Image (cartoon, rainbow, N blue to C red):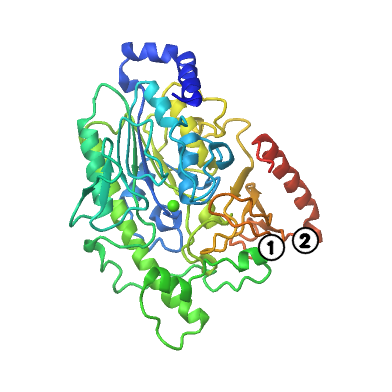
Amino acid sequence: MSRRVLLVTLVVALVFPVAAGAQAKSPAKKRPNILFIMSDDHASAAIGAYQSWLAKVTRTPNLDRLAKQGIRFTNSLVTNSICTPSRAAILTGQYSHKNGVYTLADTMDPTRVHIAHLLRALGYQTALIGKWHLGTDPAGFDYWNILPGQGVYLNPVLREIGMKKKQNRKFDGRYSTDVVTDLSLEWLKKRDPQKPFLLFCHFKAPHRPWDPAPRFENLYKDVTIPEPETLLDDYKGRSKSTANVKLRIGQDMVQRDLGVPIPKDLDRDALRKWAYQIYMKRYLSCVAAVDENVGRLLAYLDQAGLAEDTIVIYTSDQGFFLGEHGFYDKRIMYEPCLTTPLIIRYPPLTKAGGVHESMVLNIDHAPTFLNLAGGAIPKDMQGRSYKALLSGGEPPGWRASMYYRYWMHLDGSHNVHAQYGVRTPRYTLIHFYGKGLGMKGAKNIDTTPEWELFDRVKDPQQMRNLYGDPAHAGTVRELRAELDRLRKELQDER
Ligand code: CA
């Protein structure tokens, strides 16, 4: 047993003796079941309830219903907008610099204690089914069944707890999102009904390469997808770090991700508009199957009489550009990829149809689950419980700013610069600090540091970089001081 596991085992034993003892006497029902449904790269703009420019074409009746029955957060943010690090942040309640998962090349230390270990110690049954993407085998779960690596959409392969490294089960003729739901339902039906559960149901969709289920292949055949206002952005006035990223919907993206021949004689804008249609039709078709399967999970909770006692959380590991600024993908501290959908239904606490504007972070889920389960929140978790926010209010002293950091400096394929920054309800200040820090997966090429400042009240689309504008010198000073304060508080001063 490693020192860390031993330490946390001791902490759990010391902190939770009352909870562990009380568990045998009090009915398990009083502690909520937790169903955490997470998709991969699902931007909130692609959910009807979020009322974006796509609202008329999204097919998300079940997610929309969940939002009507529960509460929808409009400022749910990630601490590092990239798959593997965000997943580690969610499990550990910690930033990348604390949990050690900085980049796509890092893996989860299997001895590191996270929310599943802690809830299991409180008497929960714990399972993770679907996308894992943290390299090492999952630990802390009573049951897991995962898509190896990124997984595939069609004829998926899954590897179950107890199987050797190269063993797996192939689901011929099946679609990934359906299989992950089937396995989740199987586990729910087999569980011990006397104990509360924590189930992470993680879809691969709608991550690249956006293969729809055969039944949705022609869903958008004769539909024209509305375009975002900034699809034809020319990046004037933004930093070079932003203007030069390889996230543009253009020739490279078509060749790499869409794999269709490009019609002749398209100029930059025409190519972007044409590719956007193909991209979004595929993406939204994948979302349609996610929604359908969320509906199956919700139907099971109803049939099994579990809807009242189960907190259902729907979110994504980060957001995604759906053509805003002419981009796709994620990584930059801009709203489309910094924010995620977050819809929560827990009838004892959430008010039907609620909309919440407080800033909630991906590192807040783990402390919230502990809080709901009656456990103590370990001091080294950096997130905060949002339980008090579920009934609509905001407790005094709730965060008024958040810290973000993306570590992969010029990864080659996307050319995004390492960056950190601070976001308040009004402003976003981003610092592209120009250093490759030698992290795995990052290059050691230093670049010229740059800053961007956006006033999101006057410029919600983030088109005007105000950094360097003398009229905003005072705002810059205040935000830089806040950034320094957060970096110190979070112990990220590299
Ligand atoms: Ca992702």
Q: In which quarter of the image is the C terminus?
A: top right
The answer to whether any part of residue 57 appears in the image is no
Farthest-out residue, left: 173
Front-most of residues 144 and 336:
144
**x%, y% of residue 349?**
42, 31
**x%, y% of residue 279?**
39, 68
The crowding category of the residue bearing disc 1, from other C-alpha atoms within 10 Å (few below 14, some 14 to 19, many at least 20), is: some
The reply to whether dot 1 and dot 2 touch (C-beta < 8 Å) is: yes
The picture quadrant where one finds residue 450 is bottom right
Image height of 82 relative to 388, above or below = below
Q: Residue at the spot x=53%, y=46% of the render?
A: 77
Question: Is 183 left or right of 204, judged from the image as shown?
Answer: left
Question: Is 490 left or right of 52, judged from the image as shown?
Answer: right
**x%, y% of residue 199?**
33, 35
Q: What residue is disc 2 on?
A: 468
Q: Does the residue labelled 2 lie within 8 Å of ligand 1?
A: no
Q: Which mark is residue 318?
A: none
**x%, y% of residue 136?**
40, 41
What is the secondary structure assignment of the residue under circle 2?
A: loop
The crowding category of the residue bearing disc 2, from other C-alpha atoms within 10 Å (few below 14, some 14 to 19, many at least 20), is: few
The answer to whether any part of residue 143 appears in the image is yes
Kindly identify the amino acid type of the residue bearing the numbered disc 2.
Gly
Kindly identify the amino acid type of the residue bearing the numbered disc 1.
Asn
Q: Residue at the spot x=39%, y=55% of the render?
A: 47
Q: What residue is disc 1 on?
A: 465
Q: In which quarter of the image is the N terminus?
A: top left
